[in-house]
Image (cartoon, grey):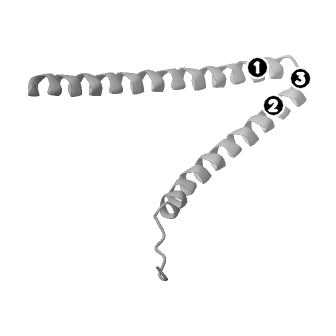
């Protein structure tokens, strides 16, 4: 009985690690692909003489990146606030 339980826990942990590894690989490939497409597009635009378009795209990507970073920071600080507020309040009059 104990042997089956340990094997089940071991298999579950192995599957969990494999899942998170796959998710991280997919996330990294997606982000890398987006960055590569952005670099290819801006390089083609600059070499084709569309400097104004390239700079506008660069400005939009900078704003997108700043917004993502700010959202990530807000999410991190928001998690701390929600953890504190999830504690049950005690009623002193009860």
Local packing at callout 1 (Cα closer than 10 Å; few below 14, some 14-19, many 20+) is: some
Reading the image, the residue beneath label 1 is 41
The residue tagged with tag 3: helix, strand or loop? loop
Residue visible at 14% across and 22% down? Answer: 4
Residue visible at 40% across and 23% down? Answer: 19
Mark 2 or mark 3: name the one nearer the start of the chain.
3
Mark 1 or mark 3: name the one nearer the start of the chain.
1
Local packing at callout 3 (Cα closer than 10 Å; few below 14, some 14-19, many 20+) is: few
Q: Which mark is residue 50?
A: 3
Label 2 – label 1 distance at C-alpha: 9 Å
Image quarter of residue 46: top right
Q: Is residue 24 left or right of residue 10?
A: right
Mark 2 or mark 1: name the one nearer the start of the chain.
1
Image quarter (top left, top right, bottom left or bottom right) of the N terminus: top left
The residue tagged with tag 2: helix, strand or loop? helix
Local packing at callout 2 (Cα closer than 10 Å; few below 14, some 14-19, many 20+) is: some
């Amino acid at each position: 009985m104990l042997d089956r339980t340990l094997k089940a826990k071991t298999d579950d942990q192995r599957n969990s690690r494999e899942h998170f590894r796959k998710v991280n690989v997919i996330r990294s490939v997606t982000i890398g692909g987006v960055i590569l497409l952005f670099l290819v597009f801006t390089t083609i635009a600059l070499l084709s003489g569309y400097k104004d378009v390239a700079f506008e795209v660069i400005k939009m990507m900078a704003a997108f990146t700043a917004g993502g970073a700010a959202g990530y920071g807000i999410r991190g600080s928001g998690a701390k606030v929600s953890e504190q507020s999830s504690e049950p309040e005690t009623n002193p009059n009860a």
